[in-house]
Image (cartoon, coloured by chain):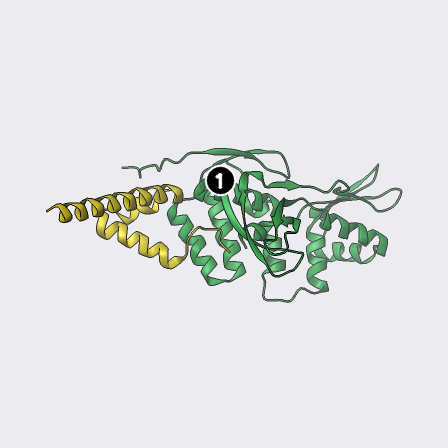
């Protein structure tokens, strides 16, 4: 059954990462619509990838 | 100080059984957690109760009792709520019927799934030249009781389910409401039906409205294309 879109393990892992590393509160996260949380997650991943790329480039240049 | 109100978008749909318009909102992450926990329990009763709880929370219109809604109304409602909460597109793995082995992923848009009623379906069953039996659809409560209880489905349960779905018996002059009859009376009434009349009741249940969607699958190994009819909530989330 996949009436929800993730399993319990990934649910807790994602919430923990968002709270621990990105200052979200559990209440904020739990009051989001699931696709809304997914959107923030996608943007965060994109942001982290861009930051990593910038860091790699500055290391190469520097 | 009053608690803050959580703002969520609202949507409207028509209940397939009555055509009544109801307002609903998507479920939230905390409500999805209830569903995930229930699903991981692999206990059908817990899953059904979780679905019911989430639906009750998401219905905004007043006066809708989830327990009294028919099973297909609940399934349709849940399908729509799920679509607006997680996304309208789901991917299901379909086993190709031509070889019965190859599984093909098929994307389904939940908005395309409708509740369909068989053409010959009627809630009125003609018992004889005078009497008509009017049925009502099984509610979620009856569905759980008869499908997920620890007891095995036996003749008693079947009779209980059928008698709970009798709305009334009427003729041109009189009518008898099932709510005025005892369980024993309804049971005796059913036991006195002929096999032909009982077959008509069976047809009522078989042709009851259900979630239906037809998809085309192409078996990549045999190149055979087949039409698959998906029915019921489990088909779309199985």
Q: Give the residue number, with chain letter if any, for mark 1.
A: B59
Residue A6 visible, this orientation: yes
Q: Nearer the viewer, residue B39 or B54?
A: B39
The chain displayed yellow equals A
Q: Position of residue B46 (x, y in %)?
A: 50, 58
Q: Is residue B205 left or right of residue A49?
A: right
Q: Position of residue B173 (x, y in %)?
A: 84, 37
Quadrant of the image occupied by residue B158: bottom right
Q: Nearer the viewer, residue B91 or A27?
A: B91
Q: Is residue B27 left or right of residue B185?
A: left
Identity of the residue drawn at 64% across and 67% down? B152
Quadrant of the image occupied by residue B222: bottom right
Label 1 is found on which chain of the structure? B
Identity of the residue drawn at 66% across and 56% down? B97
Q: Is residue A13 left or right of residue B137?
A: left
Q: Is residue B102 left or right of residue B49?
A: right
The chain displayed green equals B
């Amino acid at each position: 059954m996949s009436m929800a879109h993730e399993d319990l393990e990934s649910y807790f892992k994602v919430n923990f990462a968002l709270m621990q590393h990105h200052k979200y509160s559990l209440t904020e996260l739990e009051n989001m619509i699931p696709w809304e949380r997914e959107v923030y997650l996608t943007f965060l991943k994109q942001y982290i990838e861009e930051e990593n790329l910038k860091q790699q480039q500055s290391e190469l240049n520097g | 100080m009053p608690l803050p109100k959580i703002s969520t978008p609202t949507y409207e749909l028509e209940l397939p059984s009555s055509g009544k318009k109801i307002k609903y909102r998507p479920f939230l992450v905390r409500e999805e957690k209830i569903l995930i926990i229930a699903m991981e329990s692999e206990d059908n009763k817990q899953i059904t109760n979780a679905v019911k709880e989430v639906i009750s929370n998401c219905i905004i219109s007043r006066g809708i009792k989830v327990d009294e809604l028919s099973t297909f109304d609940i399934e349709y409602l849940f399908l729509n709520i799920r679509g607006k909460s997680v996304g309208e597109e789901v991917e299901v793995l379909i086993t190709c019927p031509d070889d019965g082995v190859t599984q093909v992923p098929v994307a389904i848009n939940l908005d395309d799934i409708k509740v369909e009623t068989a053409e010959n379906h009627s809630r009125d069953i003609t018992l004889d030249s005078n009497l008509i039996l009017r049925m009502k659809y099984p509610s979620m409560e009856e569905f759980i009781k008869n499908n997920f209880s620890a007891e095995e489905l036996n003749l008693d349960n079947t009779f209980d389910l059928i008698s709970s779905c009798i709305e009334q018996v009427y003729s041109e002059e009189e009518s008898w409401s099932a709510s005025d009859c005892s369980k024993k009376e309804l049971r005796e009434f059913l036991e006195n039906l002929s096999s032909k009349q009982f077959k008509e009741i069976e047809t009522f249940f078989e042709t009851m409205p259900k979630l239906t969607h037809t998809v085309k699958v192409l078996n990549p190994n045999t190149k055979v294309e087949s039409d698959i009819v998906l029915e019921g909530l489990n088909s779309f989330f199985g």
